[in-house]
Amino acid sequence: MGIVDDLEDMFPDTVVMETLSSGDRYGAKTASTSVSIPAYVSGRETKVRDNQGQMRTSSVHATLAGCYGATPDHRFTLPDRFNPRQPVVLAVMRSTDEDGPHHETVYFV
């Protein structure tokens, strides 16, 4: 589900979200599917609660233009100006409006 066309200019970046396989016998995971998503990516520090309920500091977050079912188990590739380009996901927050899920924000280490 994507954002309305009038808001596309608010998402000048593109992130790639990859679904990872369960892993081979050595535990190495590979991407099984990927999708490019319009996003707004910011290097602003934010306090977030991770999946274990601990308060952590996120140094980068990406607001996705819609809801894509993002989870901390996905791997994301950020635009070239960020280092690392594939940071660890701390948390995913879904925002809703009167019609249901609207967009997701992914917080990274």
Image (cartoon, rainbow, N blue to C red):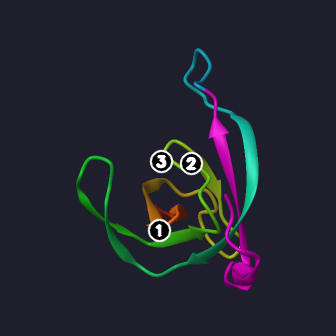
Query: Which residue is at a point 46% across and 82% down the rendered structure image?
Result: 44
Question: Which structural element holds mark 1?
Answer: loop
Question: What whole-number distance in Å separates the C-alpha atoms at marks 1 and 3?
Answer: 26 Å
Question: Quarter of the image containing the C terminus?
Answer: bottom left
Numbered tag placed on residue 98 in the rendering: 1
Instruction: Please state which amino acid type lies under the numbered disc 1.
Output: Glu
The numbered mark, 2 or 1, whose residue comes first in the sequence reads 2
User: What is the magenta range?
Assistant: 1-21
Question: Which structural element holds mark 3?
Answer: loop
Q: Say which residue label 3 marks.
A: 72
Query: Which residue is at a point 60% across and 28% down the rendered structure image?
Result: 28
Identify which residue, 13 or 86, lies in the foreground.
13
The x and y percentages for residue 89 are: 48, 54
**Label 1 Cα neighbours within 10 Å, binned few <14 / some 14-19 / many ≥20:** few
Q: Say which residue label 2 marks.
A: 69
Query: Which residue is at a point 23% across and 52% down the rendered structure image?
Result: 53
Q: Is residue 73 above or below residue 44?
A: above
The answer to if 4 sits in the magenta stretch is: yes
- Residue 108 visible somewhere in the drawing: no
On screen, residue 74 versus residue 32, left or right, reads left
Identify which residue, 100 or 58, lies in the foreground.
100
Q: Nearer the viewer, mark 1 or mark 3?
A: 1
